[in-house]
Every structure is written in C-alpha cells, then in structure tokens.
Image (cartoon, helix red, strand yellow):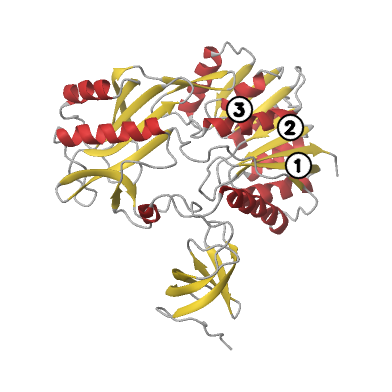
C-alpha cells in the first residue's frame, strides 16, 4: 500500500530539527518523513511553512524560531540570504567546524565503511571572513542602472551589492570601482534574455602576499567601448592594479570566460606566494582562492608524504603545479600530470620562476598518462592525488593499486567521493591511516581533506 505524504504544501507546523544536510539545511522528521529547511540548526524548534513536497521529502521555510541552538549567531547582513553563497553564516565558527568534522566522519563510515580511521578536528582560520582572493560577478541592469553582484538563489536575477563578506577588501574595492567606472562611462550591461549589451562579468584577482591586483572585463562584443578612458580611470582609482585584461565571450552560455583573452594594460600575470613558492597567475589560471588555508592544506600533504629527499613522487591532477612545487622542495623528482594544457604551461613557468629543476610536467588525463608511465617502468614512492569533485577515475585507482607506491596522499574537495575512493584503495591493499579536514571555505558547507594511506598488502 502506498504510504501518504504526511505534510501538505502551505501547511504550517512546529518541528524540532535533528541534523544538517551536506548542503547545510536543517533536517526535521514528521512521522519519519524528512523536511529540509534552510538556516535551521540541530536542536532548535520552530514553526515552518511547507513550500514544496516530493515523494521522499519536503522543503520548508522557517517562519518562527522558538528554541535556539547555542551555535546560532545573527547573520552579518540581512540581504545575504538572497544569494545563498554562505550557507552557514548563521552558525558560530566553532559550530561550523564541528559540523564539517561530523560530516567527514559520517561519510567515511556510511560510504567508505571506514570505521577505525583517525579523523582529526578541522583546521580552521583565525579570521573566517574576507579570505577570498578572487571574485567574478555578473553584470546586469535594473531600473535603467548598471548593477553587479550575485545571482539570487536558484535564479538568474542579480542582487546588486558592493561588498561580499568573504572576499578580501581589495577584491571588493576593485569590483565596486570597475562597476562605478563602467556605469559612469555608459557601458551597456549584458542582457542574457535578449543576448544584447556589452559587459557580462567583472573579475578581480588579488595577490595577498604581493599586493598585486588584476582586473578582467568580460564582454559579449569584440570591441570594448571607452577602452582608453576605462584604463585611465581603473589605474587612477586602483593604484595596486598591475594587469587589465579583456576577455570576449560572444556565446549564449552560462560559462563565464570566452576563448579570446587580451591584456590591454600592464602585465599578463600577477604574482602571489604560498609559503616559499611563488606563482604567476594569469586571467585563466586556476589558483586557490584562500591562499592562507592552502598553505595549511599543502603543509599537511607534505607532512603526510614523509619525504626525505630521494623519493620519486607523482602528482595527479597537478593544476598549475601548486602541490608539485611544494613537494619538489623535499623530493628527489616530481612528475605532475594535468588535463588542461594551459595549466601545464603555467606549472612549467612556475617551476622556472622558482628555480625548481626536479619537477617535470605532462599534459593529459591522469588515468591515461600515469598508466602509460607505469608501463614504461616509471614507479613512484609516493603518489599524490588532488582530483575534481567527482573524485579519481577508476583506471587511475587501479593503476595506483598495481603500481603499489608506499604512500598515497589524497587531497579531496568532496568527502563523498573521497570515501568511495578510499574504500577502493583499501580493498586493493592500502590502509587509511589519518584524515585531516581543512576549512578552505568558511561560512560555506565545503570542506577539504588530506588523507594518508600506506600500502600494507592484501
């Protein structure tokens, strides 16, 4: 007999919240039926309104809060709920770190069946605000005025804002200045419905350690109107700017950057450092947005490798060489592989920039290149992986199992796929020794982990 849904749309009901989902929504159960409510915390009770029902769950909206969690704080700005980027900003930072640690533990147990793995408390930040070194904001029009900010949650409606509390102040300042200049010069904002207008996005990148700023203007049109005046005003109002870039994206797409990129003033790169390693960052480079915590993450990865100076290391998914160059300071030889050719060019450039001679890079899919290296007789003492959210390809995991490096260090941005892949490696003869979560994105639900595995055999 089909079980009926115990709630109806628009019904108001008082509930107690028991848990949080992976994306930070409070979970209440009504006759065992889950209802998800944003900005609710475990242990709280309150009145909710059901706004959507599905066969297996419902979504509610918080109407009135009765018993508050000790981890609840006032959100720092009232309009931030509109764009939903900071899913946990209503929670104390202590609470956020406990939530993320618990999330990692639960996922490793549920998905990976890893019940005896040491999971340490999350390494957090002393100041968990104003940490992002990059922003790319959509541009639009409202009431005849150019606006720029963030998309309203689950929509393409732009919320105009001059400040994000998780961006570095220099990034906020740059975005506001460029928005004001474009408005003053009458540059037409892009309209995605009509595919008309000029300015689609404004991007700012900032080297926190060097104080160097890059501004990128992304337009629909090949021509950048008032280019000379734009350059003059940007350089006057933003004295830290070292690079102004024009990118053209003429397609009907949600992808931000287009295929044509031109430096219209200053340098092609800005520079930043993580620890003792210097990086050249172009408009298209992938570079971690929280460099302070990136050093924490990479220091832990380096510690887990246990390098003494003579080891051969393979770095899968090496990007622009950030982890590879960290490891090269302690290893005998490092081989990095990355699917994006531009990133490999950046990695080679960064190695040269730092005078690092013991790191080599190859463009290609890790699951293709590393098996090829293995067939050619190249073996690693330590293998490091830092895959995208989907985790490691099955062919790569099998190659690791066949190659049998003494240690695997797995850097992950997704606890779910990490747990899945750790299970596969454990079944192939590895033992997960420790997992260290690192908070790269305070105020959000995201958590990164560094895991140390040793080969013990089957």
Of the numbered discs in the image, which one, if any, rests on residue 270?
none
Residue wearing tag 1 = 434
Q: Is residue 11 above or below residue 241?
A: below
Residue wearing tag 2 = 304
Q: What is the CA distance from the residue labelled 1 to the residue labelled 3?
A: 19 Å
Q: Nearer the viewer, mark 1 or mark 3?
A: 1
Q: Which residue: 59% across, 59% down? A: 70
**Front-most of residues 264 and 23:** 23
Q: Which image quadrant is residue 326 in?
A: top right
Disc with the residue nearer the chain's start (2 vs 3): 2
Q: What is the CA distance from the residue labelled 2 to the residue labelled 3?
A: 13 Å
Q: Is residue 290 above or below residue 356?
A: below
Disc with the residue nearer the chain's start (1 vs 2): 2
Label 1 with label 2: CB-CB less than 8 Å: yes
Q: Position of residue 314 (x, y in %)?
A: 67, 27
Q: Position of residue 257 (x, y in %)?
A: 34, 36
Q: Position of residue 89 (x, y in %)?
A: 49, 51
Residue 346 left/right relative to 315 = left
Q: Which residue: 24% across, 49% down? A: 192
Disc with the residue nearer the chain's start (1 vs 3): 3
Q: Is residue 312 above or below residue 393?
A: above
Residue 53 shows in the view: no
Label 1 with label 3: CB-CB less than 8 Å: no
Residue wearing tag 3 = 323
Q: What is the CA distance from the residue labelled 1 to the residue labelled 2?
A: 9 Å
Q: Residues within 10 Å of mark 2 (few under 14, many from 20)?
A: many
Q: Which image quadrant is residue 437 in?
A: top right
For the C terminus, which image quadrant?
Answer: top right
């Amino acid at each position: 007999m089909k079980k009926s849904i115990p709630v109806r749309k628009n019904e108001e009901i008082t509930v107690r919240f028991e848990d949080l989902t992976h994306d930070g929504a409070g979970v209440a159960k009504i006759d065992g039926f889950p209802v998800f409510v944003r900005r609710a915390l475990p242990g709280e009770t309150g009145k909710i309104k059901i706004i959507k029902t599905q066969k297996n769950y419902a979504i509610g909206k918080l109407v009135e809060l009765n018993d508050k969690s000790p981890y609840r704080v006032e959100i720092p700005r009232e309009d931030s709920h509109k764009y939903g980027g900071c899913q946990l900003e209503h929670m104390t930072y202590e609470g956020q770190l406990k939530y993320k640690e618990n999330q990692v533990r639960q996922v490793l147990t549920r998905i990976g069946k890893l019940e005896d793995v040491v999971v340490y408390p999350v390494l957090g930040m002393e100041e968990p605000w104003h940490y992002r070194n990059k922003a790319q904001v959509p541009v639009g029009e409202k009431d005849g005025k150019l606006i720029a900010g963030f998309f309203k949650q689950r929509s393409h409606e732009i919320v105009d804002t001059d400040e994000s509390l998780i961006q570095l102040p220099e990034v906020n300042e740059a975005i506001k200045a460029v928005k004001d200049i474009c408005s003053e010069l009458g540059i037409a904002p892009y309209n995605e419905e009509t595919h008309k207008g000029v300015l689609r996005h404004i991007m700012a990148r900032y080297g926190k350690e060097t104080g160097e700023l890059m501004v990128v203007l992304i337009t629909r049109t090949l021509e950048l109107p008032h280019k000379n005046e734009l350059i003059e005003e940007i350089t006057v109002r933003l004295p830290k700017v070292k690079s102004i870039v024009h990118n053209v994206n003429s397609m009907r797409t949600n992808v931000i950057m287009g295929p044509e990129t031109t430096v219209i003033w200053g340098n092609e790169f800005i520079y930043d450092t993580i620890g003792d390693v210097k990086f050249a960052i172009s408009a298209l480079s992938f570079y971690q947005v929280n460099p302070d915590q990136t050093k924490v993450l990479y220091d832990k990865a380096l510690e887990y490798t246990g390098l003494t100076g003579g080891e051969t290391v393979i770095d899968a998914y090496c990007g622009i060489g950030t982890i590879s160059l960290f490891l090269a300071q302690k290893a005998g030889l490092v081989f990095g592989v990355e699917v994006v050719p531009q990133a490999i060019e950046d990695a080679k450039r960064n190695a040269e920039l730092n005078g690092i001679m013991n790191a080599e890079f190859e463009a290609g899919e890790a699951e293709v290149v590393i098996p090829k290296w293995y067939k050619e007789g190249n073996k690693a003492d330590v293998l490091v992986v830092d895959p995208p959210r989907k985790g490691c390809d099955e062919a790569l995991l099998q190659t690791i199992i066949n190659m049998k490096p003494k240690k695997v260090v797995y850097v992950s941005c997704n606890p779910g796929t990490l747990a899945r892949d750790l299970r596969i490696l454990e079944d192939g003869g590895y033992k997960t020794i420790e997992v260290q979560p690192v908070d790269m994105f305070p105020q959000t639900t995201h958590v990164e982990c560094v895991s140390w595995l040793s080969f013990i055999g089957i």
